[in-house]
Image (spheres, helix red, strand yellow):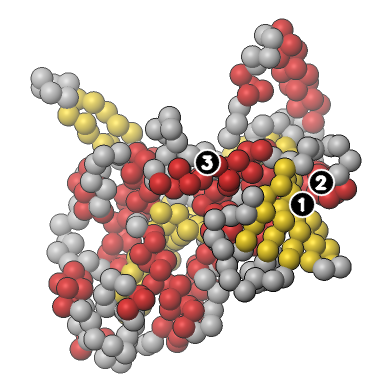
Amino acid sequence: MVSNLILSGIGMRAEIYSDGACRGNPGPGGWAAIVRISNQEKILSGAEINTTNNRMELMGAIQGLESLAEPYHVSLYTDSQYVKKGMETWIAAWKKKGWITQEKSPVKNMDLWMRLDQVCSYHVIEWHWVRGHTGNAGNELADQSANQAIDKMLRSQPKSTEAKIVSTPKLRQIVLDTETTGFKPEEGHRIIEIGCVELIDRKRTDRQWQTYLYPDRAIDPGAIGVHGITLQKLEGKPRFKEIADDLIEFLRGAEVLIHNAPFDVGFLNHELKNIGKEPIEKICKIIDTLTLARARHPGQKNTLDALCQRYQIDNSKRDLHGALLDAELLVKVYLAMTGGQVKMSLENKQSEEKIVVQVLSKNRPRLQIVLPFPEEESEHQIRLAAIEKMSGGNCLWQKLED
């Protein structure tokens, strides 16, 4: 099936075989993509120490498509019905409902589905399902490459006669906000402020990035009413092209959190395109905190001000919007929304929901993962197989998805 987006002028064809593998679910996993263009073939692979099979299947397809430097007509072969059905059948409804399933819960692996959906928009995709381990040469090579990536990763892990302790990889997140001359970049409006705050493993660091920009155009009165920034205040400030490389370097490889991301991403991509740079989605991974908020608080107001009030975050200094100020507030909202605890007070006849946010020390030790030895993992899998047989195929551990 060809994806709904039809890109005019695409004549070049590419063929991709993608696959994922996982030893335990969750457990060490690997992905691979075999990319073929004309008579050339490229094998891509990678591995993660603690993941799931579905995430690795998605990563194989993502990495294969992201390796294409320009739009192609792609025939993509996968042995995962999860990936194929997701892109052909489920994703339209997920997006329409704000990445919420029919069961009213957030879509599993939403970060990877968003990333796959974004990269698919650059190409025309034909999705093909192949049955795994049936002799299909492309699928067999992808499976072999994914497992070799796992083996390589496990060999690189430190060996010890004691239990293996592996620190979790550092997660670098950037909370970003912008202010603009108006509301639509396609009407020529520009960015006039960018504010970024860095988190490492969900802890605020001392690094931040902020700049004002001269837009070379007038600022709409309505926009001035929102942020209070006038053209006179921006005299002498740099233009976007002068700071673009520094911004890209700061964001590259991070998970970037933006409230109402399509607005800011639209402006950033407009500015990047004007100076011949790749889109922001190629530089970093975008997470829309508004989508997360709607999943956690359906049917409620989820503006930044509303979330500050809900999570008892002081926003009294926010008389006007400001990119750095709003990024600082969004840091607190995001940490509260994804890590706060909810207590119910029943002192009155009507229950009152109180959100209690515990601020942890920046210097607290990092979380650790204790992994089993290979022989322990093997015994575990044997035990699960026995439970699966005795329960008539109802072993919950075997049914776990992501």
Tag nearer the camera, 1 or 3? 3
- Residue located at (58% from left, 55% from top): 3
Residue 60 placed where, x, y %? 69, 50
Query: Which badge, 2 or 3, is on the more N-terminal residue?
Result: 3
Percent position (x, y) of residue 260? 34, 57
Give the image quarter of residue 103.
top left
Judge left or right: residue 392 versus residue 117.
Answer: right
* Side (left or right) of 166 relative to 43: left
In terms of secondary structure, where does tag 2 sit? helix
Residue matched to label 3: 90
The local crowd at label 1, few if under 14, some if 14 to 19, many if 20 or more residues have their Cα within 10 Å, is many
Mark 1: amino acid: Tyr
Q: Which residue is mark 2?
A: 139
Residue type, numbered disc 3: Trp
Asked which quadrant contains residue 68, the reply is bottom right
Mark 3 Cα-neighbour bin, 10 Å: few <14, some 14–19, many ≥20: some
Residue at position x 48%, y 39% in the image: 107
Cβ atoms under marks 2 and 1 closer than 8 Å: yes
Q: Indicate left or right for 138 with 399 as reference.
A: right
3D distance between C-alphas at marks 1 and 3? 21 Å
Point out the image quarter for the C terminus: top right
Residue at 43% from the left image edge and 52% from the top image edge: 203
**In the image, which disc is placed on residue 17?**
1
In the image, what residue type sits under mark 2? Answer: Asn
Would you say residue 174 is visible in this rendering? yes
Q: Position of residue 215 (x, y in %)?
A: 32, 85
Across and down, in percent, residue 289 comes to: 38, 51
Q: Is residue 47 visible?
A: no
- The residues bearing labels 2 and 1 have C-alpha atoms spaced at a distance of 6 Å
Disc 1 is placed on an element classified as: strand
**Can you say whether 309 is above or below 323 in the image?**
above
